[in-house]
Amino acid sequence: MALTIQWLSDGVSMPQVDFEKLTHWIELVAEKHGKQAHELTYIFCSDEKILEVNRKFLQHDYYTDIITFDYTRGKMLRGDIYLSLETVKTNAVQVGAEYETELLRVIIHGVLHLCGINDKGPGEREIMEENENKALDLYYNEIDK
């Protein structure tokens, strides 16, 4: 089955990225985790929209950079991924990263969640960061040449 990714924006301008390269990268990262990316929807949004989604669906009353809704069946990755571009930009400044790199990190973070990698429990954040860094290396060293 072929990968279908919808790239949507809700209340913000669509980021200036190469969606073809991103699609290829997402496929490769999923494969490296024994999965197949199948149906993904990315919704780029504002802080206010992600706060609304966080409150409505997760009963969390705080801003975040990403919320991933996982509809994966077996090895076929399916999900809706909300990304707040405002928080991504704020986080990039706070960690001293380029905005594009932080955006890529968050884009792949959602895929890694769908692959079964968590980041809330003891030691999980470090495992997630290690996988994000490996994925970014793949992007910059193999995809973005």
Image: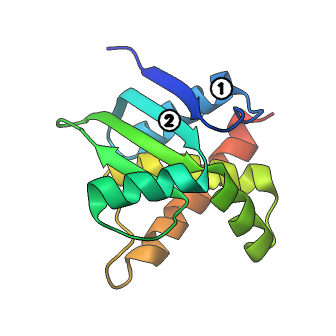
Amino acid type of the residue that numbered disc 2 sits on in the rendered structure: Tyr
| Image spot of residue 42 (x, y percent) | 50, 35
* Quadrant position of residue 34: top left
Q: Residues within 10 Å of mark 1 (few under 14, many from 20)?
A: few
Q: Is residue 141 above or below residue 130?
A: above
Residue visible at 82% across and 58% down? 98
Image quadrant in which the N terminus is located? top left
Front residue of 120/117: it is: 120
Q: Which residue lies under the disc numbered 1?
A: 19
Amino acid type of the residue that numbered disc 1 sits on in the rendered structure: Phe
**Sequence-wise, which precedes: disc 1 or disc 2?**
1
Front residue of 55/125: it is: 55
Label 1–label 2 contact, CB within 8 A: no
Front residue of 122/62: it is: 62
Residue 109 visible:
no
| Image spot of residue 66 (x, y percent) | 49, 55
Q: Is residue 1 above or below residue 138?
A: above
In terms of secondary structure, where does tag 1 sit?
A: helix
Residue visible at 81% across and 33% down? 145
Please tell me the numbered disc located at residue 42: 2
Residue 23 visible:
yes
